[in-house]
């Protein structure tokens, strides 16, 4: 069992260093399979999902060595095209191995991916695109198998800017013969991160940062070294913590240029924000103002931070309205926030929240990664002690949320055996 205990109503002060991007590093690790050689990745977050991906890569014949926050990948021994079921079901990101394994070994077998229970996340767009590039897809309700004597560049039009599908197409396109054009590509910063990494290995990609990407496939790749940027979702979580608890905190290494909608929402809620020289400083006096926001593909407000803003709105000085347009189960955390005293009403994909302060401490349960982090944020504004159970979800994406917030004056303790956490004391 894993439990985080939080003594609320402590204002935050100090500095927090932002870890490397979870959603950035995982596709980069997968893309390393396209090259037979040595790849060095720096600023790697020490989180469960990274360890899970390392386990998968090693099961496929690669060698992985994580030294501090530097990961050395030796992909010369890649020989297996079957993703192990146990690891594949542990996280959603296992699906991004489809493209690179098809590109390098011309075949792949994997179970349908696991991860957080936040709603339906089908992979139809991934499979359809790979078929258009020449792959033959088969399998059953449990596993997906694909074969391709060779992949060929083609024009692919996505009906929805899926991040995962865009990543898989990019990786397959690098190994394909000819040019692949992706229309309606996702524009999330993590797509740019993957493109820059592929360029580091020798790939040529046009249109980076836009919804139209053109990949010149079949180029010879080489060894490379790459630095993962800071995690915009972790930075947004700690920004939410400042808004809920009050105080002033500087976030070091936060990718503010990729946090536009998050920073806008924070400013509208009354948070004073300054950014210069890699320091994002946030100051919050009094209760947040109510917010009205709607989630959507980048550059719209990120669904990954919806739960955090839901928690912030629970202590706002008025009624907030938050509409979820991406994952229908994101509001699963609302019931646990209500156990902390929040007033939330859900109607047709929209949460109406009447803020109150303070919330009251209670025992609650994390159901997913971002929802678990949101419960931590809410508990900072709750009177007395709160206990958050099943924190293994949080460990999937945060190196040590207790360490980071304790450094800023919060009173948290963690007890459990999840990778990436050491026991802290209040």
Image (cartoon, rainbow, N blue to C red):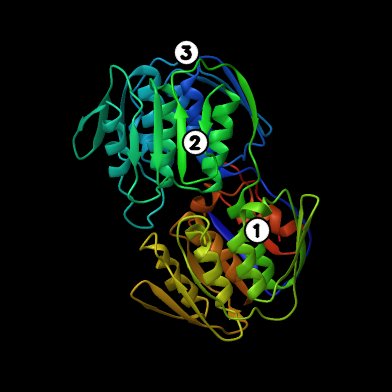
Q: Which of the two discs, 3 and 2, sits closer to the camera?
A: 2
Q: Specify whether residue 90 is in view.
A: no
Residue 94, by quadrant, is top left
Residue 81 placement, left or right of 353: left
Mark 3 vs 2, N-terminal side = 2
Mark 2 vs 1, N-terminal side = 2
Q: Specify whether residue 152 is in view.
A: yes
Quadrant housing the C terminus: bottom right
Q: Which of the two discs, 2 and 1, sits closer to the camera?
A: 2
- The label number, if any, that marks residue 27 in the structure image: 2
Residue 178 or residue 32, whichever sits in front: 178
- The label number, if any, that marks residue 38 in the structure image: none
| Measured Cα–Cα span from mark 3 to mark 1 | 42 Å
Asked if the residue under mark 1 is in contact with the one under mark 2, i.e. CB atoms within 8 Å, the reply is no
Residue 41, by quadrant, is top right
Residue 233, by quadrant, is bottom right
Q: Residue at x 54, y 28 (%)?
A: 198
| Measured Cα–Cα span from mark 3 to mark 2 | 19 Å
Residue 162 place in picture, x, y as percent? 40, 48
Q: Residue at x 49, y 52 (%)?
A: 393
* Numbered disc 3: secondary structure: loop
* Numbered disc 1: secondary structure: strand
Q: Residue at x 67, y 71 (%)?
A: 267
Residue with the mark numbered 1: 413
Residue 311 placement, left or right of 124: right
| Measured Cα–Cα span from mark 2 to mark 1 | 32 Å
- The label number, if any, that marks residue 77 in the structure image: 3
Dot 1, how many residues are within 10 Å of its Cα: few (below 14), some (14-19), or many (20+)?
Answer: many
Above or below, 114 against 111 in this view is below
Residue 50 place in picture, x, y as percent? 53, 37
């Amino acid at each position: 069992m894993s439990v985080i205990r939080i003594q609320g109503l402590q204002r935050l002060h100090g500095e927090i260093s932002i870890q490397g991007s979870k959603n950035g590093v995982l596709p980069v690790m997968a893309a390393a399979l396209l090259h037979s050689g040595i790849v060095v990745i720096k600023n790697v977050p020490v989180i469960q999902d990274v360890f899970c991906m390392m386990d998968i890569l090693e099961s496929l014949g690669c060698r992985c060595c994580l030294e501090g926050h530097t990961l050395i990948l030796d992909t010369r021994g890649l020989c297996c095209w079957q993703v192990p079921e146990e690891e594949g079901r542990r996280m959603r990101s296992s699906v991004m191995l489809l493209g690179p394994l098809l590109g390098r070994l011309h075949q792949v077998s994997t179970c349908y991916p696991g991860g957080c229970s936040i709603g339906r996340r089908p992979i139809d767009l991934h499979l359809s695109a790979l078929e258009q590039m020449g792959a033959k897809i088969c399998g059953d309700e449990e596993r997906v198998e694909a074969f391709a004597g060779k992949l060929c560049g083609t024009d692919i039009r996505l009906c929805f800017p899926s991040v995962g599908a865009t990543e898989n197409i990019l990786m397959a396109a690098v190994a394909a013969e000819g040019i692949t054009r992706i229309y309606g590509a996702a524009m999330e910063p993590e797509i740019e991160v993957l493109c820059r990494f592929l360029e580091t290995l020798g790939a040529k990609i046009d249109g980076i940062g836009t919804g139209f990407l053109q990949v010149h496939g079949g180029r010879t790749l080489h060894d490379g070294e790459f630095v993962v940027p800071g995690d915009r979702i972790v930075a947004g979580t700690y920004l939410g913590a400042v808004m809920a608890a009050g105080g002033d905190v500087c976030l070091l290494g936060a990718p503010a240029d990729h946090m536009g909608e998050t920073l806008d929402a924070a400013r509208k809620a009354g948070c004073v924000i300054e950014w210069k020289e890699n320091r994002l400083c946030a100051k919050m006096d009094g209760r947040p103002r109510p917010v009205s926001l709607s989630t959507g593909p980048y550059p719209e407000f990120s669904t990954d931070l919806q739960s955090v803003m839901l928690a912030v709105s629970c202590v706002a000085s008025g009624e907030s309205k938050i509409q979820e347009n991406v994952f229908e189960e994101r509001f699963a955390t609302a019931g646990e926030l209500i156990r902390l005293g929040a007033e939330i009403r859900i109607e047709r994909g929209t949460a109406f929240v009447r803020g109150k302060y303070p919330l009251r401490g209670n025992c609650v349960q994390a159901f997913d990664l971002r929802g678990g982090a949101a419960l931590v944020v809410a508990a900072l504004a709750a009177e007395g002690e709160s206990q958050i159970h099943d924190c293994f979800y949080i460990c999937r994406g945060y190196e040590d949320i207790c360490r980071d917030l304790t450094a800023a004056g919060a009173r948290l303790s963690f007890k459990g055996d999840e990778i990436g956490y050491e026991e802290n004391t209040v």
